[in-house]
Image: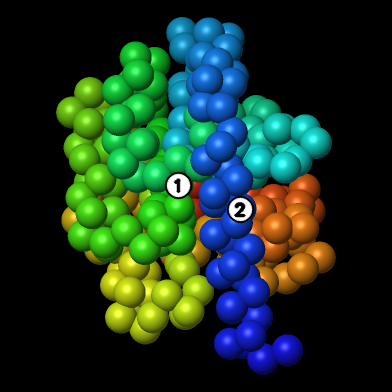
């Protein structure tokens, strides 16, 4: 199968998955995040907050701990690092939704903020400048509340079927934002996973547990330096 055909299939799967995720009740996800925050002993450990959409939440996985933040949490615990990982992923989240939700999460002290949003914007063809504006607003709110927090941005891409102009502009949002805000950058979150059927669920976009381990490795390669 050539790349164009594969990209077309991936795009269709992405749109279907994005729409399906948005139907999922945000109250359940937020309640889970609330529970995680409540369990956190911030007096003894620093907090790493993963803020994102279904990729962060672990949509479709049997065990939420198999999502890439959960895999990273296991790495942190294995290395006995003084950090607590909190997964604040919400399926179907857009950058606009995240911008509206972030203040609630900032009630919890954050030492490392990992931002993973934008994929659902791209699937819906939301103007790139709006995506960039929302992401910047989220970052501004985190920096205003916790100026000493370390910031990590997880880059995303959209299939070429969205058009060369849109695809190119979308891709540059993440390195541009990272440079502007002095954020550590993971260039492409789904590197070595996207487009590989055996590493993705039936929808063609959400990683399997095995795929999530590779995604976690992509993130860990950058995040580990922020935990020193």
Tell me if residue 82 can be seen: no
Q: Which residue is label 1 attached to? A: 116
Question: Where residue 36 sits in the image (x, y, percent)?
Answer: 57, 17
The answer for how far apart the CA atoms under marks 1 and 2 are is: 17 Å
Q: Residue at x 65, y 80 (%)?
A: 6
Mark 1 or mark 2, earlier in chain: 2
Q: Is residue 213 left or right of residue 15?
A: right
Secondary structure category for the residue under label 1: strand
Question: Where residue 175 sits in the image (x, y, percent)?
Answer: 32, 64
Question: Where residue 193 sits in the image (x, y, percent)?
Answer: 67, 65
For residue 176, which quarter of the picture? Answer: bottom left
Q: Is residue 156 left or right of residue 212?
A: left
Which quarter shows the N terminus?
Answer: bottom right
Q: Residue at x 35, y 19 (%)?
A: 104
Question: Where residue 123 sits in the image (x, y, percent)?
Answer: 45, 61
* Circle 2 residues within 10 Å: few <14, some 14–19, many ≥20: many
Q: Nearer the viewer, residue 189 or 16?
A: 16
For residue 191, which quarter of the picture? Answer: bottom right
Q: Which residue is label 2 attached to? A: 17
Q: Nearer the viewer, residue 91 or 40?
A: 91
């Amino acid at each position: 199968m050539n790349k164009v055909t594969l990209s077309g299939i991936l795009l269709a799967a992405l749109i279907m998955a994005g729409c399906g995720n948005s139907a999922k009740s945000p109250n359940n996800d937020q309640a889970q995040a609330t529970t995680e925050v409540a369990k956190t002993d911030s007096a003894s450990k620093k907090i790493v907050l993963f803020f994102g959409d279904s990729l962060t939440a672990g949509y479709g996985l049997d065990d939420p701990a198999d999502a890439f933040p959960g895999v990273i949490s296991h790495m942190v615990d294995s290395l006995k690092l003084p950090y607590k990982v909190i997964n604040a992923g919400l399926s179907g989240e857009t950058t606009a939704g995240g911008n509206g939700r972030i203040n609630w999460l900032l009630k919890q002290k954050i030492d490392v903020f990992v931002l993973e949003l934008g994929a659902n914007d791209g699937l819906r063809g939301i103007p790139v400048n709006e995506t960039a504006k929302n992401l910047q607003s989220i970052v501004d709110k985190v920096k205003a509340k916790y100026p000493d927090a370390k910031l990590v941005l997880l880059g995303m891409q959209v299939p070429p079927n969205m058009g060369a102009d849109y695809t190119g502009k979308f891709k540059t949002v993440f390195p541009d934002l990272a440079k502007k805000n002095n954020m550590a950058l993971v260039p492409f979150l789904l590197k070595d996973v996207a487009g590989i059927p055996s590493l993705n669920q039936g929808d063609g976009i959400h990683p399997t547990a095995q795929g999530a381990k590779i995604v976690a490795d992509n993130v860990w390669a950058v995040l580990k330096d922020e935990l020193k």
